[in-house]
Amino acid sequence: MGWEVYYKTKGYRIFSVCNHILLVLISLSCLLPFIHILAVSFSGSAPANANMVKLWPIDFNTDAYAQTIQNPNFHKALLIGAERTVLGTLIGMAVITLAAYALSKDQSFFRSRRFYTWFFLVTMLFNGGIVPTYMTIRTYGLMNTMWALVLPTAVNVFNMVLLMNFFRNVPKELEEAAVIDGAGQFRTLVSIYLPISLPALATISLFTMVFHWNSWFDGLLYISDYRNYPLATFLQTVIVQQDFNKINPDVNVLKNISQRTVKSAQIFIGTLPILLVYPFLQKYFVKGIVLGAVKE
């Protein structure tokens, strides 16, 4: 009853209005740049180069998207980026799920749990650095391969700790019932822990997918041929380094199309897959964060 009275007070209503206004402003600050890029990608060459386009296309046309779709370099980068995201997510989720399940056990069941927990946590504070990592990957012969982009980042300790805390919230009675029925550790993980932990798994999968899809720096380090760049690295070389030769080798076509509209079209296409996946995982996102962060 007290909370209902509190919600009806003048102070709470003022706070609620201010809070909604602030959230709307933050949402607009995230959405407007994306709308601007979309408007530029559908605009003509002259208004785009003159910075006349704001939130609505001027001289609407789809030449930039036609040019992007016909670009073999962009096609290959898009496929490599998708391959890296799928492969990296599957390997990363498999590794951290198994590690989190083992470390979620009590000290009496897994005596070395404390040692391995600290072993992983130390890597969140210290790492070997760029040069030793580069030398390690080169020594193992992983340069210019997909494994150079996937294996070094397979174990994300933050995600593992999040999932470990979620596993520790699973009622022990369920595991005990599974053991009585004759289930082993792997069967218990698959049949009991994973279905219950779907919100946490969806949240961590989203983190992992976004990381691999947006990661570009390791592509510059470990891939020497730009034709084998993942999409994020490809876009970085085009947009930041201004290397327009990778947009399309046909210079005659580029004379009639603004480089800015082509880059905007590529940015939008590169962002689209994550935008399509996120709505399906959004309902698990908040629940996965909250429940995975309650217990030590």
Image (cartoon, rainbow, N blue to C red):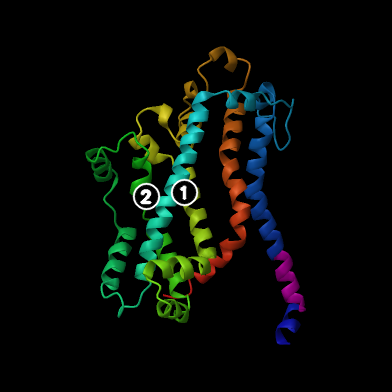
> x%, y% of residue 197?
50, 67
Q: Earlier in the sequence, mark 1 or mark 2?
A: 2
Q: Nearer the viewer, residue 134 or 149?
A: 149
Q: Is residue 235 visible?
A: no
69 vs 126: above or below: above
Magenta span main SS: helix
Q: Magenta stretch: give its range.
A: 8-18
Q: Secondary structure at mark 2?
A: helix
| Image quarter (top left, top right, bottom left or bottom right) of the C terminus | bottom left
Q: Is residue 42 visible?
A: yes
139 vs 167: above or below: above
Identify the residue under disc 1: 211
Residue that appears at 73% across and 35% down: 56
Query: What amino acid type should be assigned to the residue bearing mark 2?
Result: Thr
Judge the density around disc 1: few (<14), some (14-19), many (≥20) Cα neighbours within 10 Å: some
Residue that appears at 66% across and 59% down: 23
> x%, y% of residue 126?
29, 57
The reply, left or right, for residue 1 in relation to residue 255 is right
Tell me whether circle 1 and circle 2 mark residues in contact (CB < 8 Å): yes
Identify the residue under disc 2: 153
